Image (cartoon, rainbow, N blue to C red):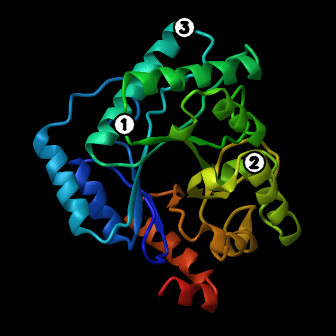
Amino acid sequence: MKNNHQTFLIGAHMSIEGGLEKALERAQMVGSTTVQIFTKSNRQWFAKPLKKEEVEAFKNRAKDSNLQHITAHACYLINLASSTAETRKLSINALTLELERCDLLNIPYLVVHPGSHTGQGIENGIKYIAQGLDEAFEKRETKTMVLLETMAGQGTSVGSKFQELAAIRALSTHKNRIGFCVDTCHIFAAGYDISQDEFYEATWKSFDKTIGLEHLKVIHLNDSKTKLSACVDRHEDLTKGTIGKRGFELLLNDSRFFDIPKILETPKASLEDDARNIMTAKQLLTLKTKSTLNL
C-alpha cells in the first residue's frame, strides 16, 4: 500500500490483547502512522476463525484512524525449511491460515521468518521454503503478499545473506506474491554494515543488485545490542546500540525509503517506550526530510 502523499511512515508492533482493533488504538496513542500486529497467537499453530464482528470492528477502526499502513507478522512456529516433513506440513497449513486472516482484514503484507534448515544444509532449506510458499499460495489465493524477513544468522537459520533470500524467490512459481522485510538489527548482526557512511551505501547496493530495492516493502527499525557480524539477534532502542545514531540518520533521511513502512520492535515495558523511540526517529530527520514529509 503506497500513499498518494509523503508521510513519515513510523510505528511499532502492537499487542492485540483485548481484540484486534485494540492494536490500532494503541498505535495511535504513541503517534504511529503505521503498525504491525499478529492476527492470532504467535505461539500456536491454529486459531478460531475470525468472527464477522471482529473483522468489521478492525476495518472500521482502521478506516477511522490516521494509520497509513498495516502489516502482519506470522506466527513464530512456522518453519518452512525444516528437515521434518510433519513440521513443514504444519507450517504450510499455518501460513495458509495466516494469509486467509490477513485477506479478511485487508492487510497487504505478512512478514514471515524464512526458517531454519535444522542441519540439512542451506540449499535444502532454500528449496523447502520455496516449495512451502508455493503450496500455501496454491491453497489460498489472496491479495496479501508474503515478506521474507532478513535473519541475523543464528544457528541454522536461512536468510541472513541477501543471496539466500533471492534464491528462495527465484525458485518460487509465485514470485509476484513474495517481497522482503529488512530488519536493521538482523542485517547488521549478519555482517551488513549500515552504521557508517562509507559502508551504508554499499549495503544497499548489494541488496539492490541481489534482490532489487523494488521488492523491499517493510523495514523493521531496530538497533542492535551485539556487534557487527555477531550473528546474534538482540534488539536495542534506536541510537543506543552498535548501529548507533549515524546509521539511523542515514536510513531515515534516505528518500528511497520514504514510502516504506518502518516498524519498531525495540525493547518495550510499556507504550511509553514506543513513543520514546518514535520521537527519537523524528529527531534524526533533517529539515529537508521534515519538509518533504510534511512534519
Query: Could you tell me which secondary element the residue under label 3 belongs to?
Result: helix
Q: Position of residue 186 (x, y in %)?
A: 68, 48
Judge whether 209 appears above or below 136 on screen.
below
Amino acid at dot 3 = Ala
- Counting residues from the N terminus, which is met first, the one under dot 2 or under dot 3? 3
Instruction: Provide the secondary structure element on which disc 2 rests.
Output: helix
Which residue lies under the disc numbered 1? Answer: 142
Is the residue marked by circle 1 packed among few (<14), some (14-19), or many (20+) residues within 10 Å?
A: some
Q: Tell me the quarter of the image containing the N terminus.
A: bottom left
Q: Nearer the viewer, mark 1 or mark 2?
A: 1
| Mark 1 / mark 2, whichever is N-terminal | 1
**Given the current orientation, which residue lies at the most extreme left position?**
53
Quadrant of residue 219 within the rendered picture: bottom right
Q: Does dot 1 land on a helix, a strand or a loop?
A: loop
Q: Amino acid at mark 2?
A: Ala
- Which residue does the numbered mark 3 point to in the structure image? 85
Name the residue at 76% across, 18% down. Answer: 121
